[in-house]
Image (cartoon, helix red, strand yellow):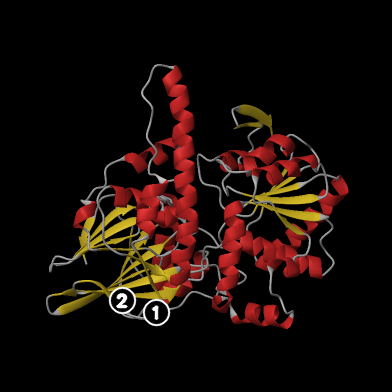
Amino acid sequence: MALLNFFGAVRQVTGSCYLIESRDGARVLLECGMHQGRRQEEDRNRAPFPFDPASLDAVVVSHAHLDHTGLLPRLVASGYRGPIFATEACSELMELMLLDSAHIQEKDAEWESKWRVRQGKPPVKPLYTTKDTERTLGLRHPLPYGNAHEVAKGVQLTFHDAGHILGSAIVELDVQDHHLTRRLVFSGDLGNTCSPLMRAPTTLERADLVLLESTYGDRDHRNSSETLEELADILQQAHRDGGNVLIPAFAVGRTQDLIYYLGRFYQEGRLPQRAVFLDSPMAIRANAIYARYHQQFAQRNQAEIEARHIKRIEDWLPILRCTPTPEESMAINRVKSGAIIIAGSGMCNGGRIVHHFKHNLWRSDCHLVFPGFQAGGTTGRAIVDGAATVKVLHQRIAVKARVHTLGGFSAHAGQAQLLDWVSHFKHHPELYLVHGELEKSQVLQQVLRERLNWLANIPEPGEQIAL
């Protein structure tokens, strides 16, 4: 029988990776994500792949976030030469994110090697290089939503809109096993139905086996309208306090949502700040990709954009200032009050946000807004958990800013939305919970049993099952 191997994002939220092997010899890798978070998790990115990359016939990815695509250049550097299937918008965003990741890998290795050489130790090599990434991008094979395509012998792929970020997909794979066809559906990251711009995730009715994400399997998100009111109140309080507002945000997805909401506040006369700085070269480039694919936005947002004759993001939020260069980024630090600064990285482990921490985090009039989940082991999680100081750019910085965590801005489906999506499947397919911390998967497992009378499995890392 065909086999399914669980190699990543099992009992954790990063490193998404699953291998399908058919009895006819087809080998399709579903996702090739990077491990993120604690140092020991990131060290796993250098471990040998648990399969021979050169033996794979195809790779399929659900969306462009690095926890789903971040090891693709290393896969290619290790011998993979086949096609990489993704949606059209995902293929463009992959270029943006993987080239940025390669640059970070090279710079980090260069920095660490300087210190190692001074200690008499050998230099380190980057996880992968820009050259590896350019070779990877040459293997992309973009596909539209809804079209079936044979990606390997006896394996048909269809993408459906997952509503998570631009180009995100639910993956449907029909695997021929002699005279039988087994259908595997991978939810990918399902979108929050309250998210702006994105459409609601497509519901499906038939599958033999479903891989369901469980990132927020233990709870529902706060009502989005309440979250927006909380954000508006924070911005008003920050204006009264006289400090800046820092918002660490992922460049793809979260940043575009925030700009949409801030633009709405501006048009309603509820944005007291004088300037909004978008200090993320990647997010600036991602905005352009979002603009090109605006036809994939939810119908309500398309109608709003057309009604207001919006052609550029600056038309939506006129006080937005994009700062792509390092010089423009550093100039922001001369602004001591009245600004909103959106910068990466989303979990504060690097990127330009840490430079703004250095200049603002110790100020009691600063407001720090976390618009999403902060993984364990990250700087963002330490701050959310109440750390008095954090290490930033090799310095200890006091956390005196007022810290806010907004619960309704997640781009992931909450528990009730996960239940609703999976309940559309008929004949109770075999169900496996992935892409979630163990305790969250266990809560969802119990709720599925109590409310839907469904049995859900939580696989072990490295487990292999018959499809």
- Identify which residue is drawn at 56% across, 52% down: 373
- Residue that protrudes farthest toward the right in the picture: 240
- Identify which residue is drawn at 39% across, 16% down: 120
Q: Can residue 30 be seen in this view?
A: yes
**Distance in Å between CA atoms under marks 1 and 2:** 8 Å
Q: Label 2, secondary structure: give it.
A: loop
Q: Is residue 69 left or right of residue 193?
A: left
At label 1, the amino acid type is Leu
The residue under label 1 is: 204
Q: In this view, does 359 lie to the left or right of 179?
A: right
Q: Position of residue 192 (x, y in %)?
A: 55, 67
Q: In the image, is residue 151 above or below residue 77?
A: below
- Identify which residue is drawn at 63% across, 27% down: 395
Q: Which mark is residue 193?
A: none
The residue under label 2 is: 207
Q: Quadrant of the N terminus?
A: bottom left
Residue 82 position by quadrant: bottom left
Q: Can residue 9 be seen in this view?
A: no
- Observer-nearest residue: 78 or 148? 78
At label 2, the amino acid type is Ala
Q: In the image, is residue 122 above or below residue 250?
A: above
- Observer-nearest residue: 84 or 230? 84
Q: Position of residue 66 (x, y in %)?
A: 45, 53
Q: Where is residue 286 in the image (x, y as percent from the top left)?
A: 57, 61
Residue 242 position by quadrant: top right
